[in-house]
Image (cartoon, helix red, strand yellow):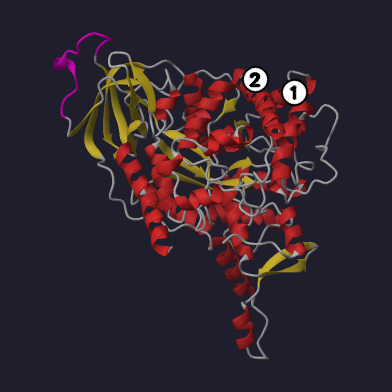
Amino acid sequence: MPARIANPLISLYLLLSPHSSRLPADGATAMRSRSALRLKHLVLPCAGALVLTSAPNANAQRAAPTNARPATADSAVQQRLLAERREDPTPAPARKEGEGPFNRLIIRGVHLIDGYGSAPRGPVDVIVEGNRIAEIVSVGYPNVKVDESKRPKGALKELDANGMYMMPGLVDLHVHQGTQQKAPDSEYYNKLWLAHGITTVRGVPFASFDYSVKERERSAKNEIAAPRYVVYQRPGTGWGRGVPRTPDVAREWVRWAKANGAEGLKLGAERPDIMEALLDEAKKLGLGSTAHLQQQGVAQMNADMATKLGLEAVTHFYGIFESMYENHQVQPWPTDANLQDEQTRFGQVARQWSLVKPHGEKWNAFLRNLKERDVTLDPTMTTYLTGRDVMKRMNASWHAKYTIPTQWDFYTPSRTNHGAYFYNWTTEDEVAWRNFYRVWMEFVNDYKNMGGRVTASSDAGFIYNTPGFSTIEELELLQEAGFTPTEAIRAGTLHAAQTIFKPMKKQIEYGVIETGMLADLVIVDANPVANLKVLYGTGWFRLNDATQKVENYGGVKWTIKDGIIYDAKKLLADIEKMGDEQRRKRAMDK
């Protein structure tokens, strides 16, 4: 059950903390904050801040002897770690799906979309040896019969992809895993991702520190059916000592995080001295950084300020509009606004569209700053899409089969579930969001046109935004913003891979299709450059003029991760069974 926040001091802590359970679209952290409340926290003053500690339950208190000693530091650490891990989903089961890798796999006759932004070419035969692309061989020309005698030989496994299209596996830089409340089994999100050709996901965070690192290692060994996991964590997670409150402690946590397996930091609008310490230490250690510059702190740390300090990526739109207000420094809120009311928060943020001047002096100066600092914009436009048309998003065709009941329950309007804020949504709210998207898309497209790096991510699991499907939707939104289809695909492949490898000062190992790259590939039986909709798990439909009947086509056919071939349709069938099983159990419980 979702937590009810009754204590006003707890509400104040949640409002001020960068780990607030009410941060927009930062769901994994949100769920863990709410689960922490279930432990009946006490609020204690500590170094001028409010700190949550876990109180024993009522039965334990009654049973305790009168001479019981205060909790030790070690027990406090354990209580914090317990709270952090309480909403972790069940780890994924051992892998049964997929074939390979093979010593010599040949994918025959495919048309290649390389990820660099160029048009498709083909037919080609692609040779994969183990988990690497060994060779790409041109085997002919369009509409000309292939000379079989000139094709590569010696395959231990062949995929007949004649007439199909291959692109690099998608890389989603903003994901969270499920929680016990909304999607209790890791397998559900993992298979949704793979079924949509997503071969790498960056958790910001996936769940607790412990869960994230362990599941990353299992995925790296292909012990589970899952994309590659890249682990970014919030400051203070994992070590049990709470959120850093001084620059020195912030640096200490970054060193601890690096030593214990983190690959980067997911930051909020931190206090300037804390932000500077976190980013400086991360850079020294080769850790990446991205930030959701939440409304509670953006006045002290907007995107221009943060990127000047070294922030490498800005996710969502928070901090972007605030960096180029024409006549304000802080967003003008209604006098009765309350940030704990999510409809107010999400409804009002869209009103920022009128506070900036497209192509004005501040707009252009900020774009130049971002480009000079080599910042990645990771807009996640799909995350907030429901705001501009709730009815459309609620009735998306994939919900019936592929959104499991617990996930649907979490979407349903609620005062306590994060992102379920449509308490009394109005036409005026939707118009504001449509105007906001128009300006937001213009900014993102301007950045792309000046050579800036833009990526395609989802932040799914909230706001009627189901994983897998939402990443494809993000590609479509980039096209709406002005990207060509190949630019949109580049955002979801090459540019996302560059964002991951850049802080490590390494060349990318996936994100494009060329010899030597890891074999992370997507094969679809229709051309995604002609229609991005064919990448949806549900495929798309068209009228067959010969039969005058509507037919379904597209949908990913095979996802290849690390040389292992996954049948995308079988993965979707497994997901459908998960929903059926939940519905069956609910029927029995009635």
Q: What is the C-alpha distance between the residues marked 2 and 1? A: 10 Å
Instruction: Give the image location of residue 58, x and y in percent.
Output: 63, 80
Q: Which is more toward the observer, 58 or 68?
A: 58
Q: In this view, does 398 lie to the left or right of 237?
A: left
Quarter of the image holding residue 477? top right
User: Over which residues does the magenta segment extend?
Assistant: 140-154
Tell me if residue 181 comes above or below residue 54 in the rendering: above
Instruction: Give the image location of residue 386, x and y in percent.
Output: 59, 36
Residue holding disc 1: 363
Say if the magenta span includes residue 493: no
Q: Which disc, if any, is residue 561?
A: none
Q: How crowded is mark 2: few (under 14 residues within 10 Å), some or many (20 or more)?
A: some
Quarter of the image holding residue 83? bottom right
Q: Is residue 487 left or right of residue 237?
A: left
**Residue lying furthest front in this view?**
590
Q: Which is more toward the observer, 167 or 353?
A: 353
Whether residue 506 is visible to the viewer of this picture, yes or no, is no
**Which residue is drawn at the image coordinates 74% and 28% (left, top)?**
353
Q: In which quarter of the image is the N terminus?
A: bottom right
Tell me if residue 92 comes above or below residue 193 in the rendering: below
Amino acid residing under circle 1 = Trp
Q: How crowded is mark 1: few (under 14 residues within 10 Å), some or many (20 or more)?
A: many
Residue holding disc 2: 446
Amino acid residing under circle 2 = Asp
Disc 1, SS = helix
Give yes or no for contact between labels 2 and 1 (Cβ–Cβ under 8 Å).
yes
Instruction: Give the image location of residue 88, x and y in percent.
Output: 50, 58
Say if the magenta span includes residue 141: yes
Q: Please, what is the dominant secondary structure of the magenta stretch?
A: loop
Whether residue 512 is visible to the viewer of this picture, yes or no, is yes
Q: Which is more toward the observer, 153 or 63?
A: 63
